[in-house]
Amino acid sequence: DLNETIGSKPQNGLDDVKAVIVVLSGKGGVGKSTVAANLAAGLAMEGKRTGLLDVDVHGPSIPRLLKLGDCRPAMTGTFMVPVEWHWNLGVMSIGFLLPGKDDAVIWRGPAKAGVIEQLAKQVAWGERDVLVVDCPPGTGDEPLSVLQIFEDKAMAVIVTSPQDMAVDDVRRSVTFCRQLSTPILGIVENLSGFVCPSCGAVHDIFSAGGGERLAAETGVPFLGRIPIDSEVARSGDDGDVFLAVASQNPSALAFKAVIASV
Ligand code: ADP
């Protein structure tokens, strides 16, 4: 029916997604993708209907972290179907759409924003309690367009490492979210202390607690510290984040504490 077609608003795969957690970082390499993957895996393991969307155009690492490197999403009509992972976690990544795993995204700004939007909306997410989004790092155009896509559903988790430089970058992320009126669920301090593989004790390599101090200073909740743990690095390389999430390692327990507080 033509009237129905004209009258109906364009379909948006996000309509039945209740909440969106956008994982942000002021700079790259602080473990944003690792936190996003573990957060999504942990929420899915708890039985929440969870999706994980990777729109980090600079280096989509979710396919590698979850060992989904060669997956290509199926289609239903004009919508892409999320790739199913353990615990019914539905995954979509810009990496699934690139021809080769080493290809960089070379689109210019506006095209990039369009691709990011399509990757969020042209997906048959269905009913989800929560969608975790691995966002490009920084406080520029890319994270801005990501936050705009989710409008008032977006809430931010900011990841930092303990070094002073990283903490300054996070201060900018906090300001960025406030300017966009995006609620901040809290700050996670990753790479915070080192778990000794032989004795299990946690040693501080960098001055620890920067994330916590910044949280207190800016009035943002502090969600927890994740130690540097060789098991986290190994599980990322081997693509078995689920083993890490389900274990009793100090890092797994730290991730669970973060999940309990979001
Ligand atoms: P980002 O998304 O911020 O660029 P990644 O999540 O890709 O960072 O992490 C960068 C590297 O650091 C990866 O090799 C990852 O496995 C490793 N890593 C992240 N967090 C930890 C941790 N807590 N312990 C050990 N290695 C980690």
Image (cartoon, rainbow, N blue to C red):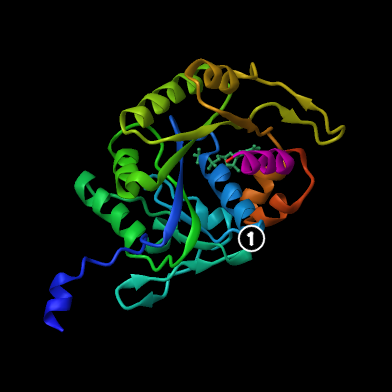
The N terminus: image quadrant: bottom left
The image shows residue 100 at horizontal and vertical percentages of: 41, 61
Picture residue at 57% right of the left edge, 44% below the top: 34
Above or below residue 32? Residue 101 is below
Picture residue at 64% right of the left edge, 52% below the top: 42
Q: Name the kind of residue labelled 1 in the image.
A: Gly
- Mark 1 CB near ligand 1 (8 Å cut): no
Q: Quadrant of residue 181?
A: top left
Nearest the eye: 177 or 111: 177
15 vs 243, left or right, is left
Q: Find the residue positioned furthest to the right.
A: 199
Above or below residue 107? Residue 142 is above
Range of the magenta residues? 251-261
Picture residue at 36% right of the left edge, 50% below the top: 104
171 vs 150, left or right, is right
The image shows residue 112 at horizontal and vertical percentages of: 26, 49
The number of callouts visible is 1
Nearest the eye: 163 or 238: 163
Dot 1 falls on a residue whose secondary structure is loop
Q: Quadrant of ligand 1?
A: top right
Picture residue at 42% right of the left edge, 75% below the top: 74
The C terminus: image quadrant: top right
The image shows residue 88 at horizontal and vertical percentages of: 58, 66
Main SS category, magenta section:
helix
In the rendered image, which residue does mark 1 sit on? 47
Was residue 257 drawn as part of the magenta stretch in this picture? yes
Crowding at label 1, few (<14), some or many (≥20) Cα neighbours within 10 Å?
Answer: few
Was residue 146 drawn as part of the magenta stretch in this picture? no
